[in-house]
Amino acid sequence: MAYWPMIAKKEPSHTIKEFRGANKMDPYSLDPSYSPRSKNLISTKFPALTTRPGFSVLGAPIGTKVLGLGVWKETELHAIFNDGTWRKWTGSAWSVPLKSGLSTTATWSFVNYKGNLAGINLIGANGVDPIQRYDGSTVSNLATAPAGGNFIETHDNRLYCAVGIRVYYSPIGIADNWNLVQQTDADGGFIDKNTPQGESICGMKAGIGHVTIQFPSSTWELYGTSPSDFSYLPVAEDIGGLNDQCIVNLGGILYFLDETGIYVYSGGTRPRKEFSAPVQWYVDNMNKTARQTSCMGADGRFLYVALPMGATATAPDTILVWDSIEKTWDVWEGMQPLMFAKMGDMLYMADAQGRVLRLGGDTDNGVPIAWEWQSKPFGGRSMGQLIRWRGLWVTADKPAGSTLQVHITDQPTGDSAWKLAASLNEKVNLQSSRIPIPPATMGNARFLRQRLSGTGAVTIYETAWDQIELPIT
């Protein structure tokens, strides 16, 4: 008696049409929309994935490191370099020094404030030099400001700064007479905060109705508007901050970084880090020696968290990018930001090479952007089954000048044994085109993964494949 021959079962076609960014958690249990390894992508075209924006360099490097980046009245970008000079960007070059002889090592913070001054001033502090002010033409010492004042902020018409465990506040509406005492609630003064660890304040950020004060091991809120009602309330007595560059506001919510994770705090409850679980691996594995160089920035939609990851890194070399709208993480490389500043709709970064970078464009200052996306490992319904991919398709936009390669591996993890399945060079121009890729380079395997990579501006809309499952062996 003749029987029909056994036909290997073919699963329905698999597709990924929604790319939800990076996720460093267990790759075997990941949803297919996540990538355990991605580089230089962004979610601006979500659910598609696309190459991140590039950057241009403003002028020539000055010194070997930028120590401060501030914005005056949303019209002028200012930087302090480690040659001890304060300069402004003229639109085509960095100005002659507005002030020289400043510290060559201390990091600056800035805030705009008018009070009793003739106009709005850019106030800067670094904890070493006298607090400085820029009035639109010159930089000078801010009269009577506390010596050693750092982490300058403004809240409820006062200036605030910190020295050690002490927070100083100026008289209401007065910037240049911190010593004014009229025995009223409008007076300036100070309030101390002792902690069990005996730590000094490492960062401050003004919020709605309070100023958030951070120590390395704890976080507090300073409530009140005058000496008669100032009081400290605990946010978390076991979660602190790394430095003043690692605490930012985005969408009215506070985000900050400490040694244990990236936290979000919206008031009333303990800070939480569940949202950053997909990238917790980076915090756990960053270079501990250089972690104090970490910094954060925000542009109204995206949160940027820059960490030193390399074994010999002396500055951040990896940026974790949180999309507050789509709730996705991406990972960027190729930049070394030490601080961020937003002016208008543009984001600027200052780096460890004495440069200021402006985010935008299709290249990294003329160099094509190298990007990568890797899938999770795919297998059969049982790990005892072998599988084969009978067909693989990628739908993409790839303009001329960009490149796209597709690789396949039978290794479930790691970054080896990749075999090239297809390559499209710079001359090929594709718009929303489906690219058939024969995966014949790979035989039967327990697991298969795919890697899409290339250079330049590319958008991936879908990757799809037919999978055959063989009997359990």
Image: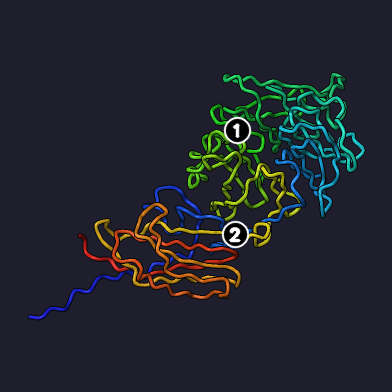
Using the numbered discs, state the Cα–Cα distance from disc 2 to disc 1 in whole angstroms.
Answer: 32 Å
Residue 171 is marked as: none
- Residue at 59%, 54% (x, y): give it: 325
Q: Which residue is mark 2?
A: 369
- Residue at 79%, 22% (x, y): give it: 189
Tally the marks: 2
Labels 2, 1: front one: 2
**Residue 258 image position (x, y, % from top left):** 56, 35
**Element at badge 1?**
loop
Q: Residue furthest right?
A: 118
Left or right: 389, with 152 as reference point? left
Vertical placement of residue 307 versus 146, above or below? below
- Residue at 77%, 35% (x, y): give it: 154
**Residue 458 image position (x, y, % from top left):** 57, 66
**Residue 173 image position (x, y, % from top left):** 85, 32
Tell me whether circle 2 and circle 1 mark residues in contact (CB < 8 Å).
Answer: no
Left or right: 69, with 221 as reference point? right
**Residue 324 image position (x, y, % from top left):** 59, 51
Vertical placement of residue 253 versus 472, above or below? above
Placement of the C terminus among the 4 image quadrants = bottom left
Vertical placement of residue 103 versus 63, above or below? above
Left or right: 382, with 301 as reference point? left
Q: Residue furthest left?
A: 1
Which residue is more in the foreground, 153 or 79? 79
Question: Identity of the amino acid at label 1?
Answer: Gly
Q: Which residue is mark 1?
A: 241
Question: Identity of the amino acid at label 2?
Answer: Ile
Which residue is more in the foreground, 10 or 473? 473
N-terminal-most mark, 2 or 1: 1
Q: For mark 1, does the 10 Å Cα neighbourhood hold few (<14), some (14 to 19), or many (20 or more) residues?
A: many
Q: For mark 2, does the 10 Å Cα neighbourhood hold few (<14), some (14 to 19), or many (20 or more) residues?
A: many
